[in-house]
Image: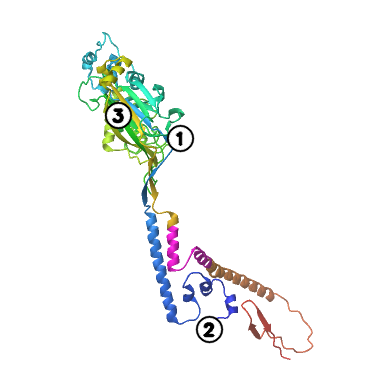
Amino acid sequence: MKRPSGLEEAQSPASDIRVFASSCSMHGLGHVFGPGGPMARRGLWTTAVLLALATLLYQVAGRVRYYGEFHHETALEERESRRLTFPAVTLCNINPLRRSRLTPNDLHWAGPALLGLEPTEHAAYLRALGRPPAPPGFMPSPTFDVARLYARAGHALEDMLLACRYRGWLCGPENFTTVFTRMGQCYTFNSGAEGAELLTTPKGGMGNGLEVLLDVQQDEYLPVWRDTEETPFEVGIRVQIHSQEEPPLIDQLGFGAAPGYQTFVSCQKQQLSFLPPPWGDCSSVSLDPDFEPEPSGPLDPPRPSLGPSPPYSLIGCRLACESRYVARKCGCRMMHMPGGAPVCSPPQYKDCAHPALDAMLQKDACTCPNPCASTRYAKELSMVRMPSRAAARYLARKHNRSEAYIAENVLMLDIFFEALNYETVEQKKAYEVSELLGDIGGQMGLFIGASLLTVLEILDYLCEVFRDRVLGYFWNRKRSQRHSSANLLQEGLGSQRTPVPHLSLGSRPPTPPCAVTKTLSSSQRTCYLVTQL
């Protein structure tokens, strides 16, 4: 095969595969399409290039498939801090209502639902409470508010809190926030409600946290009338340590502190971070318990709220889901549930709310994903007996109580950080986009010696091919049609032209057309006229 000259290569179109192969940075392409060389050598190079391309595509497909599986990995790290935010601490007396505050009207309305009493048992129950029976002609109130009952008859923090210190500074009931849970009226320390500044601590260990001395008031405990699921047999305080972003779920997640003991709680902060779909299943969109679209079924999962909402938490999602379900079934919500629906009346509690909530929990109708960012506190508990005999005498004189009362009702709770270091548990993407591109680039360089600029060269060549072969075809066709139309028009005009007579001096043969044509280039032609004298 004759090798083309440099002038012919310069005049070749850019879409010529040989021109592209000779200048492309992809290895082996010039040996396949280059001029010259035996066919066996060209065949070997073609086989090598095809095998390299096939291996590259196989490796790239595997990397893309692995990236599409969205793997993640979990990293555990321990960090140190000079100051930590103290957690929220929620306290609930295990006894929900004080016996001295119950009235015949309370028993009439709330006895069957909250205490498991029948109307015929009200008089006997009042005698067990040490209260006189209902007077003759007693008329119950036309309406009844369960939340007001717990606010009036629940244990008051002013009566339970005998002493309070935070990092050695005095604190009191004003540092607690009232919150309603399924256990009744409870109190949260360092809740951050209404924009209150959160407390912090610069040290770990005892004396650098919260210390409270509490009176559980056993004399106010309700008598055990019959064994039901809601009947408490314990005495003491239920405690939950949680972050300020999540509401308390103290009936399920709280731990107990018993009277006659000082309970030490050593905490360690843990920050959890999870990935959203498709790498994980976390969520950061809060749910509005009042957002009520048209449901397609009674157990539809709650939908995201469209307005501003508190930070998402797993407990908040569960409470919102339960509130939506009970409100949909009963037209009201239970006292501890969020939302704007009215609080259920005692008959609604007994006949609808409690059965609906129990059925919902059995079916596990609420599906709440993990929050993308959350804080929890690991705890280690230890206890010692208190008070000692000497301390019992002192406390009896100080609080005007007997030593037996102090031993049976008083407890101390000491909550502190073990150290200022904390753990972070973070989910990370196991395979980033940068790693995918790096692997693809490495495979391209290994097998075909190509890079990103090589891809741009191939795209540029394809654009040249499209312009020269496809668009050029339509341009030439359109030009030929235009020339044909012009020739037809000239022939029509020539047939209608009248011949003009002229004088002839002699016969002279017509001038012949160009007889010799020599091609110098693809764009220039010179015509030499040969005439006959």
| Residue that numbered label 1 is attached to | 308
**Image position of 116 with respect to 46: above or below:** above
Question: Closer to us: mark 2 or mark 3?
Answer: 3
Q: Amino acid at mark 3?
A: Thr
| Figure colour scheme | rainbow
Image coordinates of residue 2 in percent, x first then y, are 53, 83
Which residue is nearer to you in this view: 508 or 468? 468
| Residue that numbered label 3 is attached to | 263
Q: Amino acid at mark 2?
A: Lys
Q: Gap in Å between the C-alphas at discs 2 and 3?
A: 99 Å
| Residue that numbered label 2 is attached to | 2
Residues shaded magenta: 436-462
Q: Gap in Å between the C-alphas at discs 1 and 2?
A: 78 Å
Residue for point 40% across, 65% down: 57
Task: Please give the label number shown on residue 373.
Answer: none
**Image position of 394 with respect to 304: above or below:** above
